[in-house]
Amino acid sequence: MESLRATLLRSQIMAKIGNQGDGGGRPIVVFDAAQVAQVEALAAVLSKGQMADYFSISETTLREVESRQPEVFDAYKRGKAKAIGNVAKNLIGQAQAGNIAAAIFYLKTQAGWKEDKSVATINHNVRSFEILEDDANSSESY
């Protein structure tokens, strides 16, 4: 079932038929309820440019649709937010399960952690050895 807003927009399109200068040109693109639902579902995986390609319109036209039909813009934001929430939930689960890379990534992006540029010292177990020189009386131990 189409929303009242979409029905009104479609009736305005029909009123534009006439002579040049009387509002002719390309018809206004109006998304119905099914397309709005598709926007929400696709927002998780497509950029706005890719979504415009999916609907066979330009990105500018998609943005115009969003400005005329706020429910389209809201569906896009809602779809993105749901996807980000799902990935963040998974990331936190991985970090809590002991995935060090996930924990470090989370802390850097969410807690402001930064890597220090200092050089870490590494302790190696080195066995002592002797350097023998030609002179039999002088030997050094390291």
Image (spheres, rainbow, N blue to C red):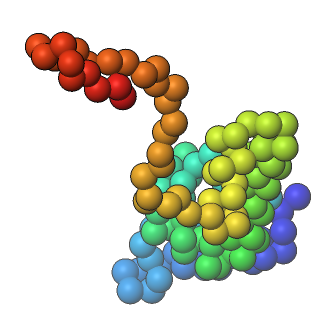
Indicate left or right for 1 with 70 as reference.
right
Q: Nearer the viewer, residue 131 or 29?
A: 131
Residue at the bottom extreme, as displayed: 21
Foreground: 67 or 92?
92
Q: Position of residue 61 (x, y in %)?
A: 50, 67
* Res 22 → quadrant: bottom left
Taking the image as shown, residue 88 lies to the left or right of residue 17, namely right
Please indicate, yes or no, whether residue 28 appears anywhere in the rendered image: no
The quadrant in which residue 138 appears is top left
The residue that appears at 70% across and 40% down in the rendered structure is 100
User: Considering only vertical position in the picture, is 59 above or below 128?
Assistant: below
Residue 110 image position (x, y, % from top left): 69, 64
User: Nearest the camera: 136 or 119?
Assistant: 136
Location of the N terminus by quadrant is bottom right
Q: Is residue 68 left or right of residue 85?
A: left
Residue furthest out toward the front: 137
Labels in figure, total:
0
Q: Please indicate, yes or no, whether residue 138 appears anywhere in the rendered image.
A: yes
Q: Please tell me which residue lies in front, 13 or 71.
A: 71
Task: Say which residue appears at 54% left-offset and 79% top-offset.
Answer: 16
Q: Identify the residue at image location x=46%, y=20%.
A: 127
- Residue 131, compared with residue 106, is above or below; it is above
Q: Position of residue 77 (x, y in %)?
A: 71, 66
Q: Residue at x 78, y 76 (%)?
A: 5
Q: Is residue 61 left or right of residue 71?
A: left
List the single residue furthest toward the left: 134
Asked if 69 appears above or below 111 in the picture, the reply is below
| Quadrant of the image containing the C terminus | top left
Q: Position of residue 17 (x, y in %)?
A: 52, 75
